[in-house]
Image: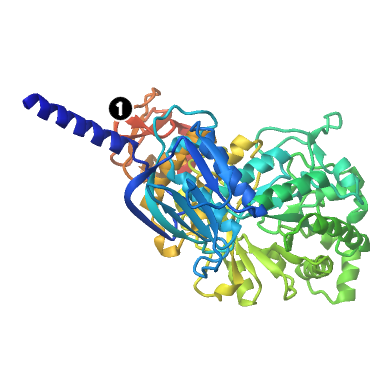
Amino acid sequence: MRKIHLLLLYLFTTFTSYSQATKPEVAIIPEPVSLKINTGQFVLPRNVVIAASAHPQLKSTVAFLRERLSVPTGRNVTVSKPSTTATIRLILLPTPDNSIGKEGYHLAVTPQNIVIRANQPAGLFYGAQTLVQLFPNEIESAELVKKTSWLVPCVEVTDYPRFGWRGLMFDVSRHFFTKQEVKQYIDDMVRYKYNLLHLHLTDDEGWRIEIKSLPKLTQVGAWNVKKEGYFGNFSPPQPNEPRTYGGFYTQADIKELVLYAKERFVNILPEIDVPGHSLAAVVSYPELSCTPGVENYRVRSGEQIMDWSHGAPPIALVDNTLCPANEKVYEFLDKVITEVAQLFPFEYIHVGGDETPQNFWEKSDAIKSLMKKENLKNLHEVQGYFERRLEKIVLSKGKKFMGWDEILEGGLAPSAAVMSWRGMKGGIQAARLKHEVVMSPTDFAYIDYMQGDVSIEPRIYATLRLSKAYQFEPMPDSVDAQYIKGGQANLWTEQVYNMRHAQYMTWPRGFAIAESLWSPKESKDWKDFINRVENHFNRFKIAEKNYAPSMYEPIFNVTKTPDNNVKIALSTEIEGLDIYYTFDNSFPDRFYPKYTEALVPPKDAVMLKVVTYRGKEPVGRLITMPVTEWKARAGIK
């Protein structure tokens, strides 16, 4: 009898351990509006049937589920017409449920089957994204995974977005990214329910879209000299260096991308950045400039062309602006906007308007004559004149006009929309003037900024940590909510050369922005968010996608002591981490001194090395700070 009892105890313990080990963790990003976890689990059968109507907009959802549920699992997945016996049922509600809107959904998982209901195909698509996140992390694998069972917790989810504009801006001008890479970026963003891709298509470093009536824009303007190092400090290219680095999208490419995005419920917002940031256009067509001698200019390769030491607007070392006093500029823009409007079905065209230098305009007789003729009091009003004329062109093509918040400075037509990047202030001002606003402030949403300490991150001029990005709140208390369309994160690519780095910069801060734009404000919880982020890090590892582990690494606060020494205080962005350090040039692990209070470097020390652990496991990367660095931060020469 005792042997039987021991056997039963063993079997119970084994079953319990197995159940706990295999029970899927619920870690959905962005957090749903409502999530109820019920008793029981759904087990993916050997033969999976997805039932959906023949609605053409369901193809992408069905294809996504079919691929994810077959490739890593080895299951046989077929598609049928609507059926009550199917494994997974995608149902468009015959009577609209006003509580979930156009992009919302209801998801129910029971031990018998899975049902997603929505008013519109977009809702079913987003419901499918949530469903896949309920599966074990191995569901992200691109290869067959030997796993005995694929379990999903029984849940009831009701979900819908807080904002209609949930965007990521991808700068494809500073560095060109191929059509396939843009598709990959779209695939990554829709997994987290983004619905707007803002393509920054033109800048000083390259013109990336074919304009058939202006062929030099891509024949000349799409190419520069490849440089690697720190953007803005490159040596000026020599005449014999080949201008073969770059590329552009043909109009056929753009149509393909627009269709690809549409199938995944993403709109593409094109940006043609004028009147500043226009060196590629000026080099292609020098007659667009106010300044003599631009015939000798070349498309920028990252060498310094602006002096920012006096703040904004910058002092231009070369004139990268279109001339507001030149009628040829408006003929040029009419041709560009005509073709852009025909390629992009989205209702807005973004025309830039940011960081326009004025020092060359100050010297221009043509600008002075324009100011006198139009009674323009200053150069901000000169740009305002330009923007109003450009807006008429955009409106004449059946599109809405959008620009960065600088367009407010010279007066703005009533129909113009504003994208606020210099903090929230511009967006608040625009909303009070009853303009539509998209919030993308530098202090929360600029994902080209460093994610951690400059000792280890690719160096750029500012830092935006994950915890700060998670604080993004697009809706100011002081404005009418109807004017705030939503928000977006912006990935400028001066220092981003390839897709692996683009992924690194986007994630996990892209998780944070997604949750700020989709989830209810009151449901946001930093500690819970971090737990879910770590789960998605594991998903990214399995999918072989890149991400930044910067949240695991310490924050350095270096100050000077009264006796002209240095004090180094360390903290962590997330809880539960220990920091170990050394000044003896060796590599610290958890057997080295643990940080407990601010460090004062030994007199002759030349190197501080730190690493973070969670328990016995290292989680952060090794960070090395030489004596020159800590003295510089403390202001000691």
Q: Position of residue 492 (x, y in %)?
A: 65, 47
The residue sitting at the left extreme is 1
Q: Is residue 225 left or right of residue 129?
A: right
Label 1 belongs to which residue?
592
Instruction: Please tell me whether residue 34 is drawn above or below residue 191 in the rendered image.
Output: below
* Residue 423 as seen in the image, left or right of residue 241: left
> Percent x, y for residue 133?
46, 45
Q: Decide which of 295, 350 is in the foreground and name it.
A: 350
Report the number of discs: 1
Question: Three-letter amino acid code at disc 1?
Answer: Tyr
Tell me what residue is drawn at x 55 percent, y 66 percent.
101
Between 330 and 293, which is closer to the camera in this rendering? Answer: 330
Label 1 crowd bin: few (<14), some (14–19), many (20+), radius 10 Å: some
Q: Is residue 441 above or below residue 614?
A: below
Residue 471 visible within the image: yes
Note whether residue 464 is visible.
no
Looking at this view, is 208 or 552 the one in front?
Answer: 208
> Where, by quadrant of the figure, is residue 565 drawn?
top left
Query: Seen in the image, is 434 located left or right of residue 1?
Result: right
Instruction: Give the quadrant of the N terminus.
Output: top left
Residue displayed at 49% across by 72% down: 477
The quarter holding residue 122 reads bottom right
Q: Is residue 435 above or below residue 275?
A: below
Quarter of the image holding residue 327? Answer: bottom right
Q: Secondary structure at mark 1?
A: loop
Residue 556: x and y, percent? 42, 42
Residue shown at 11%/27% (left/top)? 4
Residue, far top: 586
The location of residue 439, given as percent across then percent down, is: 59, 62
Q: Is residue 65 shown above or below 126? A: above
Judged left or right of residue 504, residue 399 is right
Figure coloring: rainbow
